[in-house]
Image (cartoon, grey):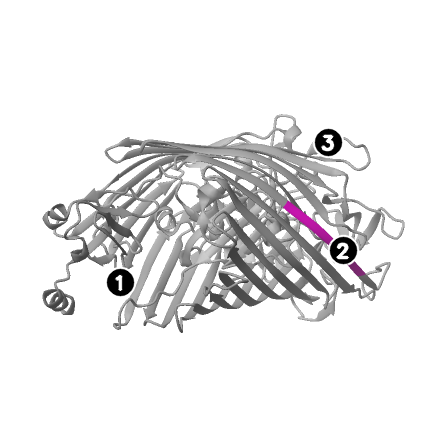
Amino acid sequence: MAMMLYALISGAQTLTIVDKTTRQTIPGVAVYSNNPPHSTYANSKGQIDASIFKAADSVYFKLVGYESPSYSYQQLESMKFKIELTETRISLGEVVVSSNRWEEKKIETPNRIEKISKKDVAFQNPQTSADLLETSGYVYIQKSQLAGGSPNLRGFSTNRVMLVVDGVRMNNAIFRAGNLQNVISIDASALENTEVLFGPGAVMYGSDAIGGVMDFHTLQPKFADSSKTLVTGSTFGRFSSANTEKTGHLDFNIGSKKWSFLTSVTYADYDDLRAGSDGNAYFLRPSYAQTFDGKDSTVINNDPSLQVGSAFSQLNLMQKIRFQPNKAWNIDYAFHYSATSDAPRYDRLYLDANNDAVLDNAEWYYGPQKWMMNRLGFINTKSNKIYDQLRFVVAVQNNEESRHDRKFNNKQLRNQTETVDAYSFNLDLDKKLNEKATLFYGAEVIYNKIGSVANRIHIVTQKETPTTTRYPDGSTWQAYGAYANFKYKINPKMILNAGARYTHYTIKADFDTTLFPFPFVHAENSSGALNGSLGMVYSPNTTWQVYVNAATGFRAPNLDDMGKVFDSQPGTVVVANADLKPEYAYNAEIGMAKTFGHFLKVDFAGYYTLLKNALARRAFQYNGQDSIDYDGQLSQVLAIQNITGAYVYGVQAGADISFGKGFGMSTKISYQKGEEQSEDSLIYYPKPHVAPLFGSTHLTYVRKKLRLDLYAQYNKKMEFKDLPLVDRTDNVPYAKDANGLPFTPAWYTLNFKAAYYINQYVALNAGVENITDQLYRPYSSGISAAGRNFIISLRAQF
């Protein structure tokens, strides 16, 4: 009523812009005319005052990701001042942040960057952030258990790829070479968008960014456009049949002109995961361990497709406060919290080393994985001689993880708990030097303190005894870095990017020799690394991009490399090694993207990465011995060492086609091959974490209120000769060929997703994954993938 009264008095005419499919309003649309010249932007409700365009011959509407129509004012009147915009993927106009830590056009960056939108996440309904990354089509996900997901970028994973949340690095001093589950702490339901930058990102992000960077941008509090308080929000409930998923989410925003508050809550509960029925029977679960009256027993699984011992639950909370005292300053505080329930380590629960039908472990589970971050950020956009934009972020992260295991018919439960308090300070600035040159520069300080405790508890008497900790308790890891990146427009068609970064790191650890005979009681490791990048982009017009780049990356040894003691697999023990150096990556890449009218987009990237002084687990002499007694078993000694080298090369390619009338098709393919050199024989063997060829193809249909997607995901076979040496020995998760040798069978799934947008407030999503109920296990994973999975969710916005 107030809006109508204002329109009558002032002569204003409200025009509303909506998405043609979802019916939701679209904020931020640029609306302009050339004759006479006028321009404005749609407010948070997707509205503008159209009366300023009464005398215009044409009114243009433009927003990245949508077609750009134009209308006369008379046409707007006939449409009752309600404009529908059609989404398009045939464009090179995306804006990204991950390349230089500030917003810039993707077409101007000499990197391959994939962006996953909030809208796509809502449609695909991934259960976790690991599943979300997999929807990009270019990220491979390994899982040791259902409560997991270790991303693989271009043949690198774990501590050779970087996780970033709102500009803060999530990687810490105990990120290991083995597969990680930390990414699931990020709430997939509370993300604005996610960017995946492929290739070394060391200049901007420092240590670990060798294979790439996964940059998560969480929901941002929104301010009101007027004196009236802005109240918005969304909620959904979801059910999935394969693991009886029950997920509920709520977020809401309250904003005034200067203050805004955003709250997000997500809770998910997952039962044991059911695998498929059509495939290699090796991937079934024929038995499981259970304890009756204090005695462990092996129980026959009456439903072998049900992966008993995989269930877990998770809670995610987020609270943000944003304050904008004036146009130049923006201050924001964020609180993030995530906690899982106990999460069974599924790939250790079906071990039977003696092949005697008696399982090795009665219990093996991770305790609650907890992640809490308090983040305070300041942005200043008042230009001066030093910067045009300044951002300062200080963050404190508190991490907790634990491991609990007990051998079959052993009464002693071993408990190891680790904590990491991670402090970080980031300063990022940019300065436009002239019409052609822009400088991005900044600094970073990181400090990690590690806590590590362990004990054994008798499950009957509850008697507690000490045991070896996983890491030296009270250890520290710290790093200091400074960077600069220079962007120069040689001419309207060619852009040069050049950058450099220097990082210095230090590790300090004190070892307790009471329970384990370490050859030293104190160790320090300190060194520096200089990295650089040089890239060129050629764009003759807005439909064509060609780029080349060369970059270096590095990974500083962390406490997990230097100070860990643990049993990686039955019969082996990994021990501490303080004599480590940083590993360096040298990467060369060429890529292109091209659109043809409004019907076709193709893109391609080819790369080669050379890894020197690569850190890897190898046979080791400990106090002159190659085997020692550990946990009551004679075990071969291994340690992280700088091996001779490794390399990975590959190709990523994609195509999007619009057939018209709402029909479309897209396909993505990734091929990678990697080898590492043996330090003793100098022979090259397949490198761990290099996924086989994988890809996806989607057939889509979009019309008003409806979106459909029929798609296939596929994965090439990996023969025994293609497996890394470590996977040939620790081969329990793999199927066996006719010769009894481990391998990964090829697999594919057919899937279907649908969304019906009842109105701009309510949407119904449904789908079925793995329609043909394939039984398969992705490369390197310890748990079989979901069988036929029915999904339904109801979403609402207000």
Q: Nearer the viewer, residue 601 or 499?
A: 499
x, y percent for residue 721: 66, 28
Measure the C-alpha gap from mark 3 to mark 1.
58 Å
Instruction: Tell me the residue that label 1 is attached to.
Output: 798
Amino acid on which disc 2 is placed: Ser
Question: Is residue 531 shown in magenta?
Answer: yes
SS for tag 3? strand
Name the residue located 51 percent from the left edge and 51 percent from the top edge.
98
Instruction: Tell me the residue that label 2 is attached to.
Output: 527
Residue contact at pointers 1 and 2, CB within 8 angstroms = no
For the residues carrying marks 1 and 2, which lies nearer the camera in this image? 2
Q: Indicate which disc, 3 or 2, sits on the residue closer to the N terminus.
A: 2
Q: Indicate which disc, 1 or 2, sits on the residue closer to the N terminus.
A: 2
Instruction: Tell me the residue that label 3 is attached to.
Output: 684
Name the residue located 55 percent from the left edge and 62 percent from the top edge.
386
Measure the C-alpha gap from mark 1 to mark 2.
53 Å
Amino acid on which disc 3 is placed: Tyr
The magenta segment is 524-532
